[in-house]
Each structure stands twice: as structure tokens, then as C-alpha cells.
């Protein structure tokens, strides 16, 4: 079967997680860069990656790359790429996104327009058509420019892979599904271990953990752009691999996954989302403030996305009230308001730190952009990792606890 070069973008900071996922699928990595992993695979790899990758944003089929410093170079070198090897004559194709970093060519609209014209020129010569019907399958193109190096790829995914299809009920500032899954995989947490999220919001961390525990492939119940690419991917591959994923699901398992939030609407949303994901019976959700966080067992995990300055709006989270104007877009001018917001945020993290210390031999992992998180918690992280949550630079703080003792097999 024909081999392709495939690119999987991800959140900055999750490259190592995505690399391991791709290795686990059985494919060879050719490059790991900031925010993306490149690997080699056939048509089956496109299907398996879309259905099975938890931390990726999407799967792109690379057409080619080249150096370009002028728009003339961009046109000629785009036209020189073998577009006809990927696009049939009826294809609907366009440059859906262009991103440029430290490059002489930086206007997305100009890049998109020029590359589309170059693609049409190439396709016209190959198919001997002056005008294309563009009434067939969609082949959206994404372009990345970095230091004048241009990479052109076709998007096999469509809507981002973080859209699993289960999060119909949402709360403010939810964490993306693929980011939550990637962060889970950065920790030592494994299926069967205790996991509590005291600021569960719409339940994403816990739902992703339950899906991992039950072997539910993240893309099993959604569609992808490349499903209509019958010139490259046999239709039966999608059916076969979905069926394979379905047969791997096992929800008849024991879990200890608990989500708490002070907001009843958030807890209701989390329960509805868990139901849609098929894991409602694997998670316990409850309206509870962080000040009431407790658990009788040892060696559990707190993995959470607590409120931080950029996410706060008027209302409550975790049992603490926050004034309107805490969101950065509000830019409150009143220094007393800013001080109040800071004080309440500090108290919230202090309470979380106290409740964590009261647990026996637990570990805690939290993602936040709150600069004083460690001071407010009352202790320093063993390490942290910079993660971009959307456009917000955050840190994933790691407070690993002791490992549980290994159980030796009984003497025969």
C-alpha cells in the first residue's frame, strides 16, 4: 500500500505524549517539532490515527515542502508539487488556513490566494481542464511557514480531533478534550487508580480517563473529511477499523473516578456529557466545594484545571465567589477590585493545598496560568511543564506522591 508522510499537530508541550501514541499504533516517527509530530504510514494509518489518537489536533497528509521568500517563489514551488497524486479532477480544494512564523511571507490571505491559483494551474495542466467542477469530495489544504520553509498538507480530519462528540453540555472555560487526555498521559495515573477532579466543570478530565479505562477510541463515534477520499482510502477500511475499535470497548470494569464542582449546572453538564460518552456508570459526580475534598483511600490522584485569572468571571467555582471583572478582557481599573480577586484566588489555592495535604500518600497535577500557584498552595512542585491552553501560556504543576507497594504473588 502507498506510503504517506503524515503530520499530527498537538498542543505545545504534548509532543512526547503524541509521539508515544503514534509509536503505540505501530508507525515510524520521522520528526518531532514544537507542536507537531511527523510520521510515515499508509491509508490505514490515516484511519487509525484519526480514530485512535487522543492528544492530536488533527492528521494532515503532507504534499510537500520548500523554501520561499517571495510570492513568485511561493506560486512556482506550490505549482511544482504533485497535487494530482492526491486530488481527483472533481475535488473541491482550497487553502483553509495559512500560518506564518518568522517568515518574509506573512499575510494569510495572500498566501491562501496565491497557493490556490498555483494548485489550479497544476491541476489544469494535468487534467486538461480550464475550469474545475469542484463538486466532489472536499480536500482542505493547510499551510505552515516557519523561517521561510513552507509545508503544504491536506487535512484528513475536518473538525479538530478534540471534538469527540460527547461534550454537548458545556460550562465556561472548558479544557479541550485532547489537552485533557494528553495531560492525563503525562502523569503516572493508569486505569484502575483513584482519580479526583475537585473543579470538574463539564467533566472532561474524568470522561477522558473513563474512556481510556474502558478502551473507548476517542474518534470512534465521529466522522472525518477523508472518509470521502475513495481515491486514496478504501471505504471498507473505515468500517473495519471502527468495528475493531468497537470490539475493544469494555465498560464492565471497576473504577474510582470522582468529579466535584460547586456549580450545580456544571455537575449536571458533566453528567450529561459522561452519558453521551458512554461512561456515565464509571464516574461519580457531586456538587461539593473544594473545602470538602476528602477520600478514605491511599495513593490517589488529583488532576484538575482550577480557576485562574484568565478564566474567572462573576460567579462561583470550587466554593469561592469571584467578582465581575476578573477576566482579563474586563481590565478592571479599580485596584481594590484587582486586590479582591487576587485575594480570593490565593485563598482558593490555599484551600486546595490544605485538602491535598490531608490526603494520605496522594499525587496532584494541575494546569494553571496563575503565577502564584505554588506559593498559594503552600509547597513547590517537583517539576512543571509549559503548556499552551489555547492562547494562554499555562504550567502543568506536578506534585507526585509515593508509589503504592507492589503486591507480591501469594506463595503456592
Image: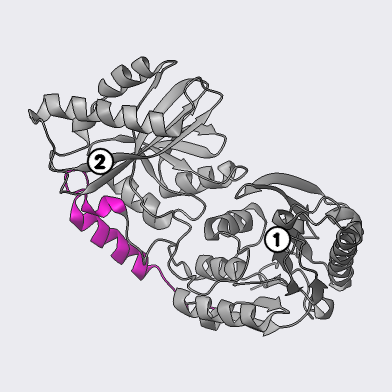
Query: What is the x, y in percent for residue 219?
Result: 40, 61
Location of mark 2 (residue): 93
Label located before the other in sequence (1 or 2)? 2
Give whichever of 383, 375 is nearer the camera: 375
- Residue 322 drawn above or below residue 396: below
Query: What is the x, y in percent for residue 101?
Result: 54, 28
At horizontal 35% and vertical 69% (from top left) the residue drawn is 246
Query: What is the x, y in percent for residue 280?
Result: 52, 81
Give whichever of 411, 252 is nearer the camera: 252
Residue at disc 2, secondary structure? strand
The answer for how far apart the CA atoms under marks 1 and 2 are is 38 Å
Residue at disc 1, secondary structure? helix
Residue numbers of the magenta segment: 225-253
Location of mark 1 (residue): 311
The reply, left or right, for residue 204 in relation to residue 130 is right
Residue 245 is one of the magenta-drawn residues: yes
Give whichever of 23, 11 is nearer the camera: 11
Amino acid at each position: 500500500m502507498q506510503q504517506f508522510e503524515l503530520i499530527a499537530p498537538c498542543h505545545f508541550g504534548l509532543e512526547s505524549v503524541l509521539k508515544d501514541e503514534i509509536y503505540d499504533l505501530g508507525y515510524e516517527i520521522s520528526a518531532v517539532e514544537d507542536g507537531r509530530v511527523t510520521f510515515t504510514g499508509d491509508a490505514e494509518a490515516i484511519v487509525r490515527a484519526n480514530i485512535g489518537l487522543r492528544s492530536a489536533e488533527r492528521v494532515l497528509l503532507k504534499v510537500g515542502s520548500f523554501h520561499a521568500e517571495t510570492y513568485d517563489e511561493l506560486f512556482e514551488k506550490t505549482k511544482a508539487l504533485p497535487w494530482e497524486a492526491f486530488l481527483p479532477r472533481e475535488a473541491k480544494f482550497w487553502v483553509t488556513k495559512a500560518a506564518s512564523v518568522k517568515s518574509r511571507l506573512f499575510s494569510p490571505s495572500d498566501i491562501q490566494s496565491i497557493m490556490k491559483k498555483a494548485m489550479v494551474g497544476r491541476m489544469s495542466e494535468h487534467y486538461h481542464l480550464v475550469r474545475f467542477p469542484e463538486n466532489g469530495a472536499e480536500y482542505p489544504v493547510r499551510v505552515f511557514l516557519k523561517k521561510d520553509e513552507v509545508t503544504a498538507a491536506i487535512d484528513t480530519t475536518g473538525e479538530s480531533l478534540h471534538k469527540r462528540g460527547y461534550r454537548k453540555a458545556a460550562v465556561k472555560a472548558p479544557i479541550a478534550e485532547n489537552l485533557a487526555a494528553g495531560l492525563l498521559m503525562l502523569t503516572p495515573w493508569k486505569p484502575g487508580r483513584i482519580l479526583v477532579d475537585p473543579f470538574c466543570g463539564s467533566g472532561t478530565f474524568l470522561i477522558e480517563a473513563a474512556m481510556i479505562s474502558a478502551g473507548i477510541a476517542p474518534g470512534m463515534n465521529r466522522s472525518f473529511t477523508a472518509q470521502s477520499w475513495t481515491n486514496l482510502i478504501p471505504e471498507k477500511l473505515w468500517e473495519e477499523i471502527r468495528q475493531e475499535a468497537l470490539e475493544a470497548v469494555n465498560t464492565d470494569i471497576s473504577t474510582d473516578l470522582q468529579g466535584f464542582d460547586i456549580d450545580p449546572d456544571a455537575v449536571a453538564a458533566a453528567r450529561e456529557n459522561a452519558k453521551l460518552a458512554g461512561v456515565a456508570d464509571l464516574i461519580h459526580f457531586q456538587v461539593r466545594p473544594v473545602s470538602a475534598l476528602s477520600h478514605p483511600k491511599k495513593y490517589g490522584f488529583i488532576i484538575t484545571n482550577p480557576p485562574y485569572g484568565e478564566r474567572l468571571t462573576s460567579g462561583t467555582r470550587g466554593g469561592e465567589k469571584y467578582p465581575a471583572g476578573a477576566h482579563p478582557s474586563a481590565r478592571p481599573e479599580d485596584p481594590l477590585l484587582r486586590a479582591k480577586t487576587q485575594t480570593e484566588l490565593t485563598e482558593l489555592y490555599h484551600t486546595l493545598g490544605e485538602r491535598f495535604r490531608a490526603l494520605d500518600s496522594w499525587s496532584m497535577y494541575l494546569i494553571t496560568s496563575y503565577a502564584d500557584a505554588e506559593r498559594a498552595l503552600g509547597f513547590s512542585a517537583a517539576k512543571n511543564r509549559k503548556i499552551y491552553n489555547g492562547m494562554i501560556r499555562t504550567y502543568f504543576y506536578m506534585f507526585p506522591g509515593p508509589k503504592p507497594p507492589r503486591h507480591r504473588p501469594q506463595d503456592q
